[in-house]
Amino acid sequence: MSAAVTMERIAEASPRLKARIAGVFYLLNILTGILAQAFVLGRLVVNGDAGVTAANILSHQPLYRLGLASALLCVASYIAVTALFFNLFEPVNRSISLLAAFFSLAACTIQAFICLFLLAPLAVLGGAPYLSIFKVEQLRALALMFLGFYDQGFGIAMVFFGFYCLLIGYLIFRSNFLPRILGMLMAMAGLCWLTFLSRPLADYVSPYILGLGIIGEGSLMLWLIVMGINAERWKKQATAAG
C-alpha cells in the first residue's frame, strides 16, 4: 500500500481513530527521542572530553548510528502528530491550531537539519585519506564541536516545541472533547521546554523539567491511545465552527 493511500485513509478515519493514531505516533516520538538522547548520546558523549567521546563513537558505531536513525524517526513521527493534531483541533480554533502547527514544523525542521551534526563526527573520525593533514587531536576536537552544535540546535528546537505545547494545551482546555486537565499538563510541559530560552537555566533544572515535560506530554499520549476523544462532542464542535 502506498504512503499516499495510507494518508488518504487516515484522513477519512473517524476523529477517535485519528486521535489514537496520533497517540501511537506520539509514543513513537517519545520512545525514539529517549533512545537517541539518553541511551545513545547520553552514554557516548562526554562533555569537554574530545578523546573519550571519539573513542566511544568509534568503538560503538552501530549504537551511534542507531541513535542517529532514532533522532530522524523522532522528527518524522512528530510531523505526523502535528498534522493529526491540526485536524483534531481545527474545530476549536483554526487560527491557533495553524499557529501551533507552524511552531511544531519549525522545530521539526531545526531538528532534522541538526541531525547533520550527528552525521559529521562519523565522517571526521572515519579515517579518510584527505583528513590526514589534520592531527588526531584536531579531528577529535572537530567531532566534539559538531556534537556541541547539535546540542545547541536541539535547545533552540525545544523552545519552539515549548510554544507548541502551550498552544495545544490551550486548545485542549477550550475543547469539549478532551479533559481540561490534559490541557493544563500540556501547558506545564510547554513551560518546561521554554526554559531552554536560557540554556544555563535549562541545564540547571534539567532533571525536573525533563520529568515534568514527559509527564505532561505522556499523559496526553496515553489518553489518546487508550481513550481517544469524545467523537460526538468533536463533531458538534466541528459543526458549530462551520
Image (cartoon, rainbow, N blue to C red):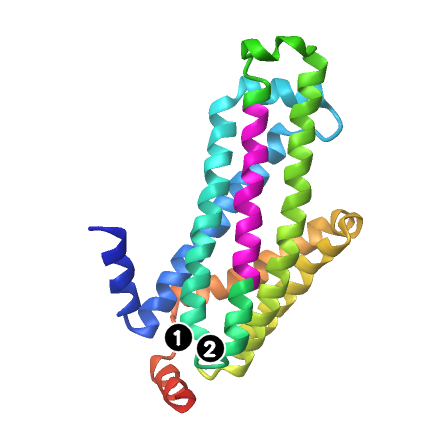
Q: Position of residue 55 (x, y in %)?
A: 62, 17
Residue assigned mark 1: 229
Residue assigned mark 2: 178
Q: Nearer the viewer, residue 215 or 151?
A: 151
Q: Position of residue 156 (x, y in %)?
A: 66, 51
Disc 2 is placed on an element classified as: loop
Residue at 69% across, 60% down: 194
Q: Is residue 85 above or below residue 241?
A: above
> Is 46 contained in the magenta span?
no
Q: Position of residue 160 (x, y in %)?
A: 62, 58
Mark pair 1, 2: CA separation: 6 Å
Disc 1 is placed on an element classified as: loop
Residue at 58% across, 71% down: 167
Quarter of the image where the C terminus is located: bottom left
In the rendered structure, which segment of residues is drawn in magenta?
103-122
> Do residues under tags 1 and 2 come within 8 Å of each other at their CB atoms?
yes
The total number of labels drawn is 2
Res. 228 image quadrant:
bottom left
The mark nearer the N terminus, 1 or 2, is: 2
Residue at 46% across, 75% down: 89
Q: Position of residue 43 (x, y in %)?
A: 61, 31
Q: Nearer the viewer, residue 199 or 226?
A: 199
Amino acid on which disc 1 is placed: Ile
Q: Nearer the viewer, residue 29 or 207?
A: 29
In this view, which residue lies farthest toward the left?
A: 1
Camera sees residue 212: no
